Image (tube, rainbow, N blue to C red):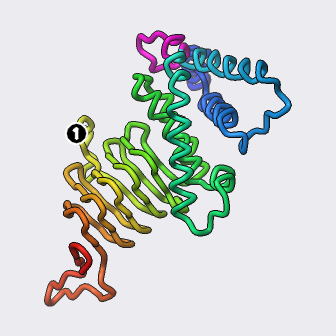
Amino acid sequence: MDKAFISKLYITHQACPTCPAPVEVSKFFEDLLGALFADFTQLAHLSEDQFEALLETLQIELVRILRHNPTRGVVDAPQLAEDFFQSLPVIYDKLQEDVTAMFEGDPAAKSRNEVVRSYPGFYAIAAYRMAHHLHTLGVPGIPRIITEHAHGKTGIDIHPAAKIGEHFCIDHGTGVVIGETSVIGNHVKLYQGVTLGALSVNKEDAEKKRHPTLEDRVVIYAGATILGGETVIGHDSVVGGNVWLTRSVAPHSKVYYQAKMYNGDTHEMDLVIFKGDQ
């Protein structure tokens, strides 16, 4: 192999010899999820003091990850880790609300434990809730590794910067994409294959709101694609499967495709919007 190429690679490894690998960040998330939810890791053999010590060990691990984060900037790692762990009760309560949403929203769910133990939607939302809190504390990079870890396991891609309300349900989930500037209200339900995306992928639009807003109690069925930062789905609306939507709809709307082909001669549209109970 070319010696110059080997030297080039070697130098990159010397630039940050203690940078936490993505697998270390993912392990931290999984260990913390196991501590929060016994369905992931049975720790009944520990005394309460030992369990408390386990949480302290996880906090120390987060400090280490934050200190060696290559994109960390200037941060107080111990204080950030303390702030994050002090927020765990709030994160836990939100996740319990999410479990309730998935249990009540899926007739196939036989128990809350089943949701926690086996539903990809719960796993992805748990990763998002933790990653989003780290994001709000100003931690770069690490939150994205956590949500991408969940993406790899579940097929559900949630950007940690997205804003998602309480009682959130993702049913089945594979193929769901929630972009960086999406805003989702309370009691919202998404089915598999839903995309909340951007109309433009220009790099200069990075600081703009590029992804849609879903108000409270919106339901989006499988395969729907909703694009654009100015697109707002009004509260209590239902968007049917495979709808392609790039403009806002009023509250209490129902949006779906009629089962007919597009006619190129008459330019007849197959998108129909009903308001209320029509």
Circle 1 residues within 10 Å: few <14, some 14–19, many ≥20: few
**From the viewer's perspective, is 23 left or right of 186?**
right
Q: Nearer the viewer, residue 45 or 154?
A: 45
Callout 1, which amino acid? Lys
Q: Nearer the viewer, residue 258 or 34?
A: 34
Determine which quarter of the picture holds residue 218.
bottom left
Residue 201 versus residue 234 in the image, above or below: above
Q: Which residue is identified by label 1?
A: 208
Determine which quarter of the picture holds residue 268.
bottom left
* Main secondary structure found in the magenta portion: loop
**From the viewer's perspective, is 229 left or right of 83?**
left
Q: Nearer the viewer, residue 10 or 32?
A: 32
Q: Residue furthest left?
A: 266
Residue found 32% across the figure and 54% down from its top? 216
Residue 169 image offset from top left, x and y in percent: 48, 55
Residue 23 image offset from top left, x and y in percent: 64, 33
Label 1 element class:
loop
Determine which quarter of the picture holds residue 273.
bottom left
